[in-house]
Image (tube, rainbow, N blue to C red):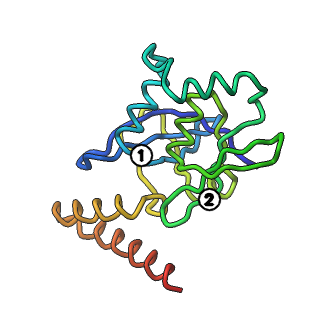
Amino acid sequence: MDSLLLIKSVSEILGIKDVALVSLVNATETRQIVVSCELEMRDLIMKYMTDRPETQMLFPSVVNDILATRDKSSLEVRINGVKDGVYQTEIYDRLTQKSFPIRCSDGIFMSVACKLHIYASAEVMRLHSIPYVTGATKVGLPLSVLSEKLLKNSLQMAIETENYEMASNLRDELNKRHKDKHE
């Protein structure tokens, strides 16, 4: 069964300048998935979450206004899987049964701007979610959901800080992905 997700927090990654994290929690706030995004997308998500007046004439708000002329309750954001560290995400229209692939961070943004529900498949929750702890200041990330760029940045940082166990795990994940691509 798919899980309805809610945006719980938007934050930066300490030591990595150009990446932010969006934490999505299930309705019971026991599990979460964490999605990486660019800082620009983080800023847009946060602007729309706080419903700032300057967003009213921006493209996403206008799209939302256009969508409001029809029943948009059939639209939802679905996170269906992970491939090479990237969440496979779509905007799905239950009415027409059409799906439109989208980057996960853009799907999250669209959910905020257009007030759409976000769902994660049972498989995503089983394989890629982590426990959610209220008030936690640190969050662990499954390596399977990190982009190759983020894996490489994290590997460099692990080497620089002499965290060789983490560096080894990151290297193994990168090697696994390259091996899978060549099979």
Report the Cα–Cα distance between label 1 and label 2: 17 Å
Disc 2 residue type (three-letter): Gly
First reached walking from the N terminus: tag 1 or tag 2: 1
Single out the mark in the foreground, 1 or 2. 1
Q: Please give the residue where the numbered disc 2 appears in the rendered image.
A: 81
Q: Residue at x 58, y 41 (%)?
A: 30
Residue 4, position as x, y percentages in the image: 67, 39
Would you call the spot at circle 2 few (<14 residues within 10 Å), some (14-19), or many (20 or more)? some
Disc 1 residue type (three-letter): Cys
Residue at the extreme bottom? 183
Q: Disc 2 on helix, strand or loop? A: strand
Q: Residue at x 74, y 29 (%)?
A: 72
Instruction: Please indicate whether residue 67 sits to the left or right of residue 153 in the image.
Output: right
Q: Please give the residue where the numbered disc 1 appears in the rendered image.
A: 37
Instruction: Please indicate whether residue 68 sits to the left or right of residue 23 in the image.
Output: right
- Give the camera-side residue of 99 and 39: 99
Q: Disc 1 on helix, strand or loop? A: strand
Residue at the extreme right? 95
Residue 2, position as x, y percentages in the image: 72, 47
In the rendered view, tell whether residue 108 sits above or below residue 51.
Answer: below
- Give the camera-side residue of 112 and 28: 112
| Numbered disc total | 2
Residue 117, position as x, y percentages in the image: 67, 34
